[in-house]
Image (tube, helix red, strand yellow):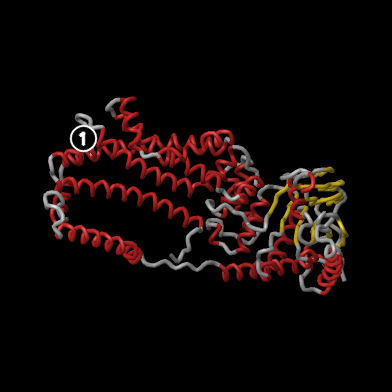
Amino acid sequence: MTITAPRVDTTTAISLRGVSKAFGHGGNAVVALEGINLDVARGEFVCLVGASGCGKSTSLNLIAGLDRPTVGDVAVHGRTALMFQEAALFPWLTVRDNVALPMRLAGKGRAERHRRAEELLESVHLGGQGGRRPHELSGGMRQRAALARALAQDAEILLMDEPFGALDAMTRDLLHDELEQVWSSTGLTIVFVTHNVREAARLSDRIVLLTSLPGRVADEFPVAIARPRRIDSPEVMGLAAAVTDRLRAEVRRHSDDPHGN
Amino acid sequence: MATEVHTENTDVSDQKLAEEIAGLDALEAHLGTHPSRARRIWTTAWPKLAAIALALGVWQAVVWSGWKEEFVLPGPDKVLPALFELLGDGDFRYAVGITMSRAVTGYILAMLIGSVIGLAVARVKLLRSAVGSLITGLQTMPSIAWFPLAISLFGLTERAIMFVVVLGAAPSIANGLIGGVDHVPPLMVRAGRMVGAKGIGLYRHVILPAALPTYIGGLKQGWAFAWRSLMAGELLVILANRPSIGDQLQFARELARSQQMLAIMIVILIIGIIVDTIFGRADVAIRRRWGLIDPAT
């Protein structure tokens, strides 16, 4: 059995130190994250996994700079791009113009935008589809276009908030292959939020398990499975089972404590 | 040696992935069929033609019932020839031209003013709480109620008419823009921010395009108010050497030429419908491009 050399280098891309985030004030405050410590190395693929209310999306917003922590430090080295569960393509633009918009906002020339957008569409297997409108694409194609648009931002860090959650299993499997290919060819750092444990084992270098209400880092699982992987391989399924057991234990703790206090 | 084999394998799996993705895309792509053009025109035209025939039928029935003398309320058999005669009359076409140039000027002014005010109110919170409900109030105010003020401010002049047309149309246009900006999906704004749009760029590339359908709705309603205000204005403010649809209508009534009066009313109705149809087309075209209309319909 071959084990791929760790592609993770030593410089950190993201560092969260003692990060807490509360919403609301006083007695009504909800603590979404509490005392989170998390380091993500440059080029690493990390999955955040947890049950509802574990503050997965909150962490991404903090890393993306869309929100600020109540306490603690968030250090991000490099530009970030964010992908959502919905493709959130702009319906008034063609697929190509959607991909080109970040470059347009960055002040790049028309010819360069056009060329690069075609290149990016090609890299997500949407070559020749650039002239179509978002609504003319299937859900999987839209997510790939959204991936191309995220890549067009020349970001070093890609944050993904359950990006494949709304897709059917077949499409999702193919998008896993697609994303793995993009990741290995670009050297992106990826933080991928999901509630699908198998998806996490299929994709990531490391799984970070978060507890719910308040969100804390409960456990970490390094994923030492050779790539390319299959979601239904025994190694992936075995690891997923172990993570699921740990996740269930966490969820059980809330059964006699409905308010999470 | 081993590396080469590995590369080859990767190429093969890349190729396989590309084929699988292409296959799935082909299966999922929309298969839209379009009915023939003639058929489409007929499907949209026949209900309208039937409605016109019905209206003419009811009108003729009222005339035949003998409710009013025929010189007061002539039937379609008298009015339709009068309408064709009117359309062939150069003087009347000149009057229509003046009315239309007033309509276009007034409407463009209302569009500019309404859009600037709408954008300002949508952007600035303080303005919103100050004049937001005032704009809606103005929108419900019958435009004819402005005329006494307009006439005392500007006298019986073109400017009095313009004043009322603009006041009639601008609030609807402003409200359309405000509503459009208010209802931009938060996800679009978030996505826009994420791809690097901020400040004016966010408005130009995300918020205003997203507000377009509602804005068009406001423009359409603004047109209806502008046209109404203009007709009211032309009935009240009659200027020498400036014949208009409104004053022709007034003269036809004064001279007791009922066929002509009804024929002019039909012209007013038709112009209103034509312009409204243009707005309707624009609305449908946008929604089709955005995928908000089922392609089968």
**In front of the other: B205 or A12:** B205
Residue B282 position, x and y percent, is 41, 51
B200 displayed left or right of A66:
left
Judging depth in this view, the residue of A9 and B185 nearest the camera is B185
Locate residue B22: give its quadrant.
Answer: bottom right
Q: Is residue B87 above or below residue B58?
A: above
Nearer to the camera, A78 or B232: B232
Mark 1 secondary-structure assignment: loop
Snapshot quadrant of residue A214: bottom right
- Which of the image's four quarters has the N terminus of chain B? bottom right
Q: Position of residue A148 (x, y in %)?
A: 65, 54
Q: Is residue B247 left or right of residue B210?
A: left
* Amino acid carrying mark 1 in the image: Pro
Residue B2 falls left or right of residue B163: right
Q: What residue is pinned by disc 1?
A: B243
The chain that hosts pointer 1 is B
- Residue A236 is situated, as x and y percent measured from the top left of the image, at 81, 70
Please say whether residue A225 is visible from this viewpoint: no
